[in-house]
Image (spheres, rainbow, N blue to C red):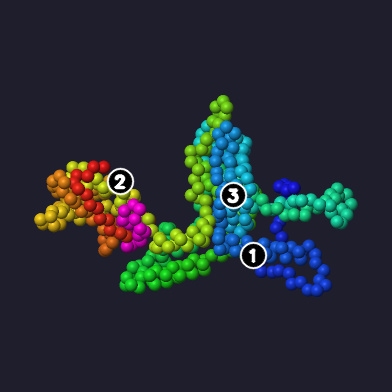
Amino acid sequence: MITPDVSAPIPATDPFTTLAPHFGMLLGVSDLEAVVGHAWAKSRLHNSWQHGESVIWGFALSVDPPTREVRVGAGLGQDSLGHELSLPATYCLDLAAWWEQHKADLGPPGQPFDAHVVARFRACLARPVPAVVSPCEGADAETAYSRLAETVELFLLPGKADRPADRYPRLRAFLGLGGADPDSDAQRQRVAATEPGERTTAWLAAVRRLAAADGIDRKPAGAGHFPGPEPDPDKPATGALVLGNLIGLTLTQTDPPQASVAEIDYSVRPSHVDTVTLLELAARGEADAGGPRVKSVRTAGKVIHVEVTRAVVPTTLSASVQSYDPATGWRPVAVTGLGYTAPDITIDLTTRPANNTRLRIVLPGTGPAPVVADEAGVPVALAGVVGGPPAGRDEGRDVVLSLVFPKEA
């Protein structure tokens, strides 16, 4: 029997102190806690620092309209203190009762609101057995709990949760996965200035430098050994694992009452990817910097429209257009102007080509002046076409488009 209302601290949380037994040594409760707790704390230390808080599998979220419940599917995860969070079956949160508790902050009934779900570790006493010693005078307990069960508490909290802070921010920025960072920018410039044949070695050296710098900055939270804060009983978000945002929750006053959700946002949830998958993903090569990519091309009159996946800086636009004739080969086609009107780069030709003219359009993503998008003041080069290989932030990929004029959408 598990008694969720009876919480208990986990034994011996020091991963660096254990029992040193000797023959004839009398063992007490604290000694047994040191034996059990040392291995437990070692496992938590490994989980928290080398894997980080994350969902390993499951924890699907849904809203059931008729019962007005938020449902959390079975799952396994771990928090920032290295606790393993195991939910063996689907559990439900009463959305209507929760709304009554928080309605002062959520607005009138029927108005959409946002909330998020978190999971937090809890240890509960279980399996009561007869106590060996007699209870104290006046006490009525003749049993004691013999097991410590690891369980999970689920909380629905008002508002949207932010994604936890990124670990290794310099390294992520260097790989094009974060905002601008001066150390990462300096290393990227160093790599770009290296001879092509030595660039792989320079890239590896930059990764090592930035990983070391990020590792130096990492420190335990408070005076403990772990990167996350100890859970605060009065603050459910502390030490908890974010499972997702429920955006646009609505409780209707229809007959019967209903509940709905506009969107379930899992992007704020940190997810664990196993090492075998990471190894195979790494085989793809350099991480993509997220530069704009070309989706399609079409013509309208004498204007060529090149659709791109994200906004580009109009002042960086450049393009060359050539026409092909078997007798003369490739010849330049005059361009009157270049512009960007979301989502298209527009290339205005001086004159309309004759029908069935074969054109070749080149947009630069490499060289001294590539077409770029702006990311917090940092240029990100054109990355090629959609579905193409990864491209770097500074050295993207040229786009070469061939079409027979005119080309319909």
Q: Decide if residue 379 is on the left or right side of residue 59.
A: left
Tell me which numbered mark, 2 or 3, is placed earlier along the sequence: 3
Tell me which numbered mark, 1 or 3, is placed earlier along the sequence: 1
List the residue tagged with mark 3: 75
Q: Which mark is residue 342?
A: 2
Q: Taking the image as drawn, is residue 221 in sight? A: no
Q: Does the segment drawn in magenta span residue 389?
A: yes
List the residue tagged with mark 1: 42
Quadrant where the image shows the C terminus: top left
Tell me which numbered mark, 1 or 2, is placed earlier along the sequence: 1
Q: How far from the left and from the top, in percent, is residue 217?
A: 52, 66
Q: Tell me the element at label 3.
A: strand
| The quarter of the displayed image where residue 12 is located | bottom right
| The quarter of the displayed image where residue 221 is located | bottom right
Q: Decide if residue 297 is on the left or right side of residue 267.
A: left
Question: Which segment did they paint magenta?
Answer: 377-395
Q: Residue at x 44, y 68 (%)?
A: 207
Tell me the kind of residue under disc 2: Ala
| Magenta segment, prevailing SS (helix, strand or loop) | loop
Residue farthest toward the left in the current orientation of the protein:
327
